[in-house]
Image (tube, helix red, strand yellow):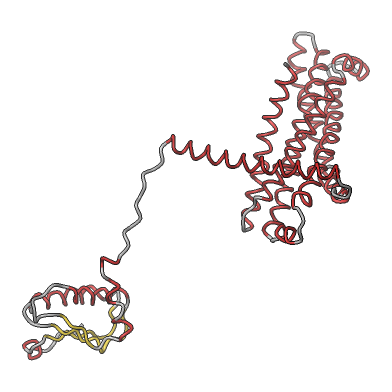
Amino acid sequence: MTMPAPDAMKADPVILALEGRVTAYLVGPIWAEALETLSRYADRPIVIDASRLESIDDTGIALLFDLKSRPRSVGAEVEIRGLAPSLAALIPDYAPDDVAEPARKWPPLGIIERAGRAASLQLAAAARMLAFLGDCAAALLQAFHRRGVIRWGEVLSVAAEAGANAVPIVLLIGFLMGVIIAFEIGLVAQQFGAVIFVVDGVGVAVLRELGALMTAIVFAGRTGAAFAAQIGTQKVNEEVNAILTFGLDPVRFLVLPRLIAAVLVMPLLTVLADVVGIFGGALVLAGFNIGFVQFYNHLLGAVGIEDFLVGVVKAAVFGLTIAAIGCQRGLATGAGATSVGLSATSAVVTSIIWIVVLDGFFTVLISS
């Protein structure tokens, strides 16, 4: 900003000429000099000549508003000349009264309120899960009453992927499980000369509990996540919406084959885990001078068909639970690739939690 020549300063009005650029980096000295001029000539009118401005930003417009809006005596007003009409129209918008109040900063939530919100979210999730299970039950009932509802080709495809391809890892986990249980219990039982009773522990633990439980955990990490990722990807790619557009039910078309395949496959995988688990225990006990024939004869007296059936029933329920949670998380996937990963993670974590809960429920129910 250039100050007027001495003769101009004495003239009426006082002219302040803005030249060049008035931006945030340069406006400080200009603002201070302009305020000093307004204070010095408080009884004379001020004319701000903006005809030679090259550029001006928001800060410069705020300067013009501040100078024009300052209270002055009658006849000593501030007038702006030579400013482009488009810029002059912006000056009234910089009034402080038009500035929105900053958003109120709410205090942090208390423990009770956070607990209430968490409970509300969990109840909403439970309601969605119940609605999904209702849709699955309705689709299953419809499948029993109408032929052709179940896509058996898709069921076999899912069963091959979820079951046949999972056999190696299930065999490995089951074998190591039997070996570890037999070895740990055998070390303690050997001190009391009761190694033969390790057969009871291995048989009951594998058939009733660990066979179904470990298989279910592997199934949840492998197949539950796959179900959530597959359906979630279809949801992101709008394929689920396309199914709805064709008048098809996504539950019957996508979910039902996976539920049936999981219920059929999980007991078979559990039986394999039981067999290799008991075989692993027999190998370990052979090192404790318990032969295979002696192991087999004692095992027949230690466990019964009911122990085997308990594990099989658990496996079927676990398979249904894992498949239902995986499919529900997949259908609830939001937009974006990140949501697919979150759905898969949520499916695995939720499935494992429910597996443990259901296993405890079965244990209490059978014991009573």
Q: Residue at x 21, y 73 (%)?
A: 66
Residue 229 in the figure: left or right of residue 288: left
x and y percentages locating residue 327 in the rendered image: 72, 46
The quadrant where residue 80 appears: bottom left
Please determine whether, in this image, residue 242 is positioned above or below residue 213.
below
Depth check: give the residue in front, 348 or 87.
87
- Where 322 sits versus 11, above or below? above
x and y, in percent, of residue 321 in the image: 73, 37
User: Is the residue 248 above or below the residue 35 in the image?
Assistant: above
Q: Quadrant of residue 132?
A: top right
Splitting the image into 4 quarters, where does residue 129 fall? top right
Quadrant placement of the C terminus = top right
**Furthest residue to the right?**
293
Is residue 312 shown above or below 13?
above
Q: Position of residue 145 (x, y in %)?
A: 85, 43
Where is residue 146? Give x, y as percent.
86, 46
Is 264 situated left or right of 3 in this image? right
| Residue at 23 percent of width and 75 percent of height | 65
Q: How many marks?
A: 0
**Furthest residue to the front?**
145
Q: Nearer the viewer, residue 86 or 304?
A: 86
Q: Is residue 348 left or right of residue 165?
A: left
Quadrant in the picture for the N terminus = bottom left
Seen as rendered, the residue at the extreme bottom is 7
